[in-house]
């Protein structure tokens, strides 16, 4: 299992993605890795701090009812991925399926291909969970 | 453009203040709580009634209303429809039991779109008045069928958005057009602003496919508003959000100026199409250019 807090490249691609990621507590909003390089910490701290506001503030029964109206199955009323985009950055939050209360937070420049970023993040989450 | 100018028609006798919106929200939540196919009359003692068909509002009347539907219909035309012609149709309707609005459409005096606007206005005003009385419904009497055409009925969230639109009808119309032009099949949506008149989200437009309970809709909008608020702390320019849940469902939200839009998508494909459509409108509506890059595996 690799350390999370590093700049990622994608196999075969000589240019790095400039994607930084780390695990964070969804309850406290704190980054969970002590040894993060300072530049990585700076890029992710703000995003991680929002986790308690993003998760647990929306009534799960409300999401369930919406799922029902959309033809989905009720019972899985937690966001599994949140993306935030601006002209400057792409931020991604992906809760770990195997570690309740912990999410991967990631950030990269907006010029990066989103598909590539999501693939890299999902691969990193699976890697971190030993899947 | 098929968008009816429902939002642009003012209801001058209704002040859309915070108290009124809260009271309307409570009343409409009561309608939402009725069984799915609820058809019948919701009675408010001597103060008025709301007629429902399949939990949609097809007629509402409050005792203290100033305008009658026929007045609204007559004054929607320039010059106003001749009173005698309208009254003749009204008399016939009293005999054969046909709803007056539909008889006017059949007569050619009023278009379907015009009737829908007039009914929206009339029912909205009635509901605002009923909510303003502070009374709760005292009975719901089930009917087999009310006889109203579903084309001329309104979901509770449409009524809520119509009342929210009164703050700024032009803004609400722009939001309605944006929703109509942007939403894709398998999605429905809503537009809201952070109003001065209410705490939290003020719904100003919904597309006609949206039939979520008003309480859930407001809750989701408040969550999205909070999301943009907290995102502001680390990326003030964040303008597009996609959140997925339940395996294939997605919420896509974007903002343009002061208006925030929320699209709820029944599939990942619908979410991808919705964001892709934002690409087209990015240049003209002010949605961030980042939306234009969206693509790839989702």
Image: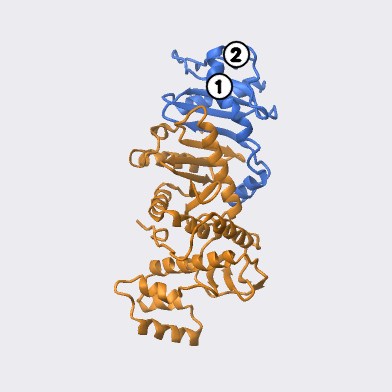
Chain colours: A blue, B orange
Asked whether B261 or B182 is in front, the reply is B261
Which residue is located at x 45 percent, y 57 percent? Answer: B166
Q: Which residue is labeled 1 in the image? A: A44
Q: Which residue is labeled 2 in the image? A: A36
The total of numbered circles placed on residues is: 2
Instruction: Identify the chain of the residue marked 2, using the numbered disc in the image.
Output: A
Q: Earlier in the sequence, mark 1 or mark 2?
A: 2
Q: Are marks 1 and 2 in contact (CB under 8 Å)?
A: yes
Asked whether B157 or A53 is in front, the reply is A53
> How packed is label 2: few (under 14 Cα within 10 Å), some, or many (20 or more)?
some
Q: Which mark is residue B154?
A: none
Examine the image and state in which quarter residue B52 appears: bottom right
SS at circle 2:
loop
Can residue B233 be seen from the camera position used here? Answer: yes
Instruction: Identify the chain of the residue marked 1, using the numbered disc in the image.
Output: A
Which residue is located at x 61 percent, y 34 percent? Answer: A53
User: Label 1 to label 2, Cα distance in Å?
Assistant: 10 Å
User: Whole-percent x and y of residue A59?
Assistant: 65, 44
Residue farthest to the left?
A: B79
SS at circle 1:
helix
Asked whether B41 or B272 is in front, the reply is B41
B111 relative to A57, above or below:
below
């Amino acid at each position: 299992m690799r350390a999370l807090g590093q700049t990622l490249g994608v196999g075969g691609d000589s240019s790095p993605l400039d994607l930084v990621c780390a695990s964070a507590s969804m309850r406290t909003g704190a980054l969970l890795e002590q040894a993060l390089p300072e530049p990585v910490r700076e890029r992710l701290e703000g995003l991680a701090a929002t986790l308690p506001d993003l998760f647990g503030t929306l009534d799960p029964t409300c999401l369930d009812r919406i799922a029902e109206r959309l033809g989905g199955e009720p019972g899985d009323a937690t966001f599994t991925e949140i993306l935030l985009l601006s002209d400057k950055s792409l931020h991604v939050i992906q809760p770990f399926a195997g570690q309740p209360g912990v999410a991967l937070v990631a950030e990269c420049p907006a010029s990066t291909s989103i598909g590539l970023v999501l693939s890299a993040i999902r691969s990193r989450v699976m890697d971190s969970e030993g899947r | 453009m098929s968008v009816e100018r429902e939002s642009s028609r003012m209801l001058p006798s209704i002040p859309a203040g915070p108290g009124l919106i809260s009271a309307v929200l409570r009343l409409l939540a009561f309608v939402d709580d009725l069984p799915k196919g609820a058809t019948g009359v919701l009675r408010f003692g001597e103060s008025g009634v709301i007629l429902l068909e399949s939990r949609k509002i097809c007629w509402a009347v409050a005792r203290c209303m100033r305008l009658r539907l026929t007045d609204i219909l007559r004054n929607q035309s320039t010059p106003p429809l001749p009173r005698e012609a309208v009254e003749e149709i009204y008399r016939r309707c009293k005999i054969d039991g046909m709803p007056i609005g539909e008889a006017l459409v059949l007569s050619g005096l009023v278009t379907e779109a015009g009737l829908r606007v007039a009914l929206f206005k009339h029912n909205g005003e009635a509901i605002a008045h009923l909510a303003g009385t502070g009374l709760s419904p005292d009975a719901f009497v089930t009917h087999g069928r009310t006889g109203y055409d579903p084309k001329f009925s309104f979901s509770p969230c449409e009524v809520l958005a119509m009342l929210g639109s009164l703050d700024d009808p032009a803004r609400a119309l722009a939001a309605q057009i944006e929703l109509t032009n942007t939403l894709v099949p398998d999605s429905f949506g809503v537009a809201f602003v952070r109003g001065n008149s209410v705490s939290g989200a003020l719904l100003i437009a919904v597309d006609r496919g949206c039939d979520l309970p008003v309480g859930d809709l407001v809750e989701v909008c408040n969550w999205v508003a909070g999301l943009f608020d907290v995102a502001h702390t680390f990326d003030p320019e964040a303008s597009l959000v996609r959140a997925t849940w339940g395996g294939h469902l997605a919420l896509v939200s974007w903002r343009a100026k002061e208006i925030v839009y929320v699209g709820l998508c029944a599939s990942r494909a619908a979410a991808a199409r919705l964001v892709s459509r934002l690409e087209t409108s990015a240049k003209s509506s002010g949605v961030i250019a980042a939306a234009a890059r969206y693509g790839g595996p989702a």
